[in-house]
Image (spheres, rainbow, N blue to C red):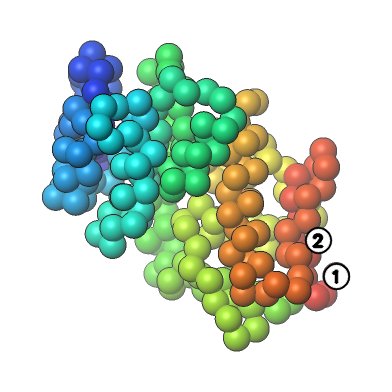
Amino acid sequence: MSKILIIDDDTAILELIKVNLELLGHEAITASDGVKGFALARQELPDLIILDVMMPDVDGFTVASRIRNNPSTKDIPILMLTALSMIQDKTKGFDAGVDDYLVKPFELEELKLRVRALLRRVNAIPESLGKGEILTVGDMTLLPENLSVQIKDKTAKLTPIEYEILSMLMQNHGNAVTAPVLLKDIWGYSPDDDIETIRVHIRHLRTKLQKISPDKKYIETIYGGGYRLVTDED
């Protein structure tokens, strides 16, 4: 199974998550603070990191940023686990590079669902890199071999989530893709209160596209209907 690193200063939650992940057959390693957690992330290179936010000395947002900025750990998916539930807290987490966000208190079944969805993506992306076909719509080309998008002669590196979102929009070119559909197909679940998850990743994706092609808006928001890819063909 998978190796999962849990970083949380609450020993009761740490042990609860560890036991339940091990019951599923995973190898669970733990750290009680952000400094030890980041060191273990570099040493162990886990398949997934479950990361608390409110920890002494170094908080989870800082740890997430360090993980994303380190070449050896930058692609490890991160599930942020925290009592902070405001939209601005979620946005800060996603801006730091978090892949998913679960608010305390949480149901163990929900945690298992999120873990399963993130691990599924980790297993799916390498397969798509080896077998995926280059996808082109208008002047935009999606390059699976290095998770990047090319517009004319300029390219931008994408995160795995940004790659999957853009791939879905390109495959549904001309039609709106709703946020619940994106959540279901990419994250593996469709909670009613996590639309902000999509909004933050769409914003990051738009920013990257804007940098390599500043004269065109490629992702259109269809209010009440989701998002639609717009290219020179439209």
The answer to whether marks 2 and 1 mark residues whose Cβ atoms lie closer than 8 Å is: yes
What residue lies at 28% left-to-right and 46% top-to-bottom? 47
In front here: 166 or 24? 166
Q: Position of residue 135 (x, y in %)?
A: 61, 72
Extreme residue in the left direction: 43
What amino acid type should be assigned to the residue bearing mark 2? Gly
Q: Is residue 126 above or below residue 183?
A: below
* Label 2 or label 1, whichever comes before in sequence order: 2
What amino acid type should be assigned to the residue bearing mark 1? Asp
Quadrant in the picture for the C terminus? bottom right
User: In which quarter of the view is residue 142 placed?
Assistant: bottom right
Q: Position of residue 39 (x, y in %)?
A: 16, 45
Q: Label 1: few (<14), some or many (≥20) within 10 Å? A: few
Give SS at disc 1: loop
- On the question of residue 110 being in view, the answer is no
Extreme residue in the right direction: 234
Q: Is residue 27 above or below residue 149?
A: above
- Pointer 1 residue: 234
Q: Position of residue 12 (x, y in %)?
A: 23, 13
